[in-house]
Each structure stands twice: as structure tokens, then as C-alpha cells.
Image: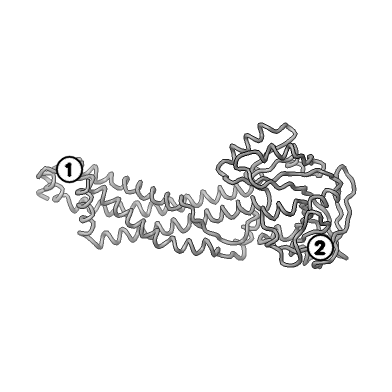
Amino acid sequence: MKELIKIAWRNLWRSKRRTILTMTSIILAACMAMFTRSMQKGSYENMISNAVKLSTGYFQVQANGYWENKSIDKTFIDSPTLLNKIKNRENVGIIAPRLESFALVSSGKHTKGALIIATEPEIENELNKLSEKLISGEYLNADDNQILVVEKLAEYLQVSVGDTLVLLGQGYHGVTAAAKYRVKGIIKFPIPQLNNQLIYLPLKAGQDFYSAYGRITTYSVMISNPENLDEIVTQIKSELSDDYDVMDWRELNKEMVQAIQTDDVGGQIMLTILYMVIGFGMFGTIMMMTMERRKEFAIMVAIGMQKFKLFLVVLYETIMIGVVALIISIIITYPVLLYYFYNPIPLEGELAQAMEMFGAEPVLPFSLDADIFINQTLAVIVIAFIASLYPLTKILRFNVLQAMRS
């Protein structure tokens, strides 16, 4: 085996120019494949992370029918018994109880509809680092009767920290919900959709405002290992009664999931084209090497070398070209991906608007997922095997005497 590998390695450099040209074509295609795949996966991870942390959690427990009809009447009691059924599960992390509804927000002559999220400030801060998004004022305490307002909404209403806002909405079972709240802090989200219409209240103050005492609309649940999501959701569904719905983030963000799947198909088509470039480059090289060395192969078979071992030599040559080129590609690409992983590219114009439509931050992040590099390696090895089928058929079928006379 070692001797065959040594022969294959030496054979590669008998025609340095051809080997280098082939490797160069593979390096360019592999670098492009890793770069585009990293960019795609980074965008998907960013969209999912934003949706999970800032909105839905990995899954939610809701009152039956709440998702179809998001009414304040579709709430349930925030009971320790129910909470423990969810909490006492392996991999279950933060559980954020929320009371979500809508209200008209007014300041002087300015009025706008807003999404009201009443939550436990400490838990919410642990979940999505709200206190780090403060641009002025202070963060909420559980006993506060004050609010946090997002930046663009505060600008529209022309209010700042210390000013008062009037909230008007419909409470539990049709009760009129109306109150004044002092603005304790202003926060800024990177996602314009959230930065235009969001107000945070402490959970107790929100329940008082909507007259939904002790009630919530959802438990938003984070888990430590997303790979176990389906198993956890299935277990919790089996324990809870029909009064509750358990929905994972994919059900809660169907539009985003469909956008990711559609974009991923386009990415796979691009990868296929790049793999075809790699495949034709390797096949062309191997075909030329095989045709030029027919006499050499005939002499080696004549002096006693088995045709199968001769094929192994050619196979090793093909794999070596691919693997060496791939190693160089990773060495070139990884530092670039590492830089953009920590420094995402900011987006502008229509592309930024498209990202914002799906609730994603308008940046182009990159991923360092090991699958990106593993998949490229496996793809190149498979292509090398396929490219080796041509010399295999030639070596097994060629006539030794005719080849020696050629």
C-alpha cells in the first residue's frame, strides 16, 4: 500500500504544470463553494437565532386556539404545576412567561398601534439581553409600573425617558384597558420590524393593565440542545391536556422556514455547478494521464504488476490531487470566513429590506459550521472516485501488445 501511494505521489509531479492547473481549478471552485455555503448557513443561523431569542423561543406553550386567534381572551393561568411539567425536562433552559397583546399608544397629537409584551424583566433579560440594548434610561424591575419603548416608536411619538405615554386597548373578556405609564428606558433593536412597534411592561403591570390577573398568553421556552427539540416537544405534548398547544419555532415562523428552504435549493444548485467544474477538471486530467501512459501501463503489466494495483495507483493520484487542493482551499478560506464570522457585512437597499421582511437583522453573517468543510471534503472524494471510473475501464480492458506498439 505504501509503495503504491509513493508511486502515485511521484507520478503527479512528472507533469507539474498539468497537476498545478488541475489543483488551481479545484481550489477556486472549492473556495467559492465554502464561501457561498458559509454565507448561506450564516444567514439562516442569524434568522433562526433572531426569531428564537427575540420572539418565539424554540417552542411555545399556548392556550388551545391562541395561534389562530390571537385574542387576549385566549390566555391561561400561570400555574407552578404547569410550569414544572415543562421545566422538569432534560435540556429545557429558560422559560419566559409572556402576556402579549396590542394597544394604541398616544403622546399628545401622536398615536400609533404597538405590540405590548408583558414579561418577567429578569428572565427576559437573561433570554435576549434587553438591558444591553438600552440607549437611554434604565432597565425594568419586576415591581415597576413603567415601560420600555423601542427607539423608532419613541421618535414617532416624540417622547424620551421620563415622559408619559397613554395606552388604550381591550382587556380580558372585553374590559377596557387604559392607563398612563412613564417611559423608564428606550431600547434599540437591530431589526426595524421590532424597532418600530414594541413596548415592554413588567408581567404584573401588564396583567393589571389588561385585567388578566395571573394569566399569560405563552411560555416561550429555550433549550440547551436544539437537536433534541422534536423529542422534547413530543414529550411535553403527551403530558399536557388538550387545553394547551405546544408549537415549535418552525410552526411559529412558517414564512421564514419556507424562505430558508427556497434559498437553500438555489444554494444547492450553485454547489452542483461548482462540483461539476471540479469533476470536469479532475476527469480531464485523469483522461489525459491515462491516454499518455498507455505504453507505460502496458510495460508495468508485462513485468508482472496486477491491473488492479495499477488502477489503485491512478485512483490514489486522483484523490491526492483533490485532497491537496482541498487542504489549500481550507487554508485560504478559513481565515476569511473567521474574519467575517466576527465582522458580518452590513446590508443596504433591497437586500436589507428582504432580510427585514423575515425578521432578520440586515447583516450578512458567516458560519463556521464544521459541516461546511466536511461536506466539501466528502464531495471531492466522491468526485475523485467517479473520475477514476474512466481509467478503470481502460486499464481493465486495454490490450498489452497493442499498447506497447502505440
Q: Residue at x 77, y 60 (%)?
A: 148
Identify the image quadrant of residue 331: bottom left
Image location (x, y in percent) of residue 227: 55, 43
Q: Residue at x 73, y 42 (%)?
A: 67
- For disc 2, the neighbor class at 10 Å (few under 14, some 14 to 19, many from 20) is many
Q: How many marks?
A: 2
Identify the image quadrant of residue 69: top right
- The way the protein has been coloured in the rendering is one colour
Identify which amino acid the numbered label 2 is placed on. Answer: Val
Numbered mark located on residue 303 in the image: none
- For disc 1, the neighbor class at 10 Å (few under 14, some 14 to 19, many from 20) is some
Q: Residue at x 47, y 50 (%)?
A: 268
Along the viewing direction, whichever of 237 and 156 lies nearer the viewer = 237
Quote the CA–CA distance across marks 1 and 2: 86 Å
Residue 227 seen in render: yes
Is the residue 373 above or below the residue 217 in the image? below
Image location (x, y in percent) of residue 125: 69, 55
Along the viewing direction, whichever of 114 and 294 lies nearer the viewer = 114
Identify which amino acid the numbered label 1 is placed on. Answer: Phe
Image location (x, y in percent) of residue 138: 76, 64
Along the viewing direction, whichever of 186 and 250 lies nearer the viewer = 186
Identify the image quadrant of residue 362: bottom right
Which residue is label 2 attached to? 183
Which residue is label 1 attached to? 398
Choose the circle earlier in sequence order: 1 or 2.
2
Q: Is residue 216 left or right of residue 231?
A: right
- Front of the two marks 1 and 2: 2
Image location (x, y in percent) of residue 382: 35, 46
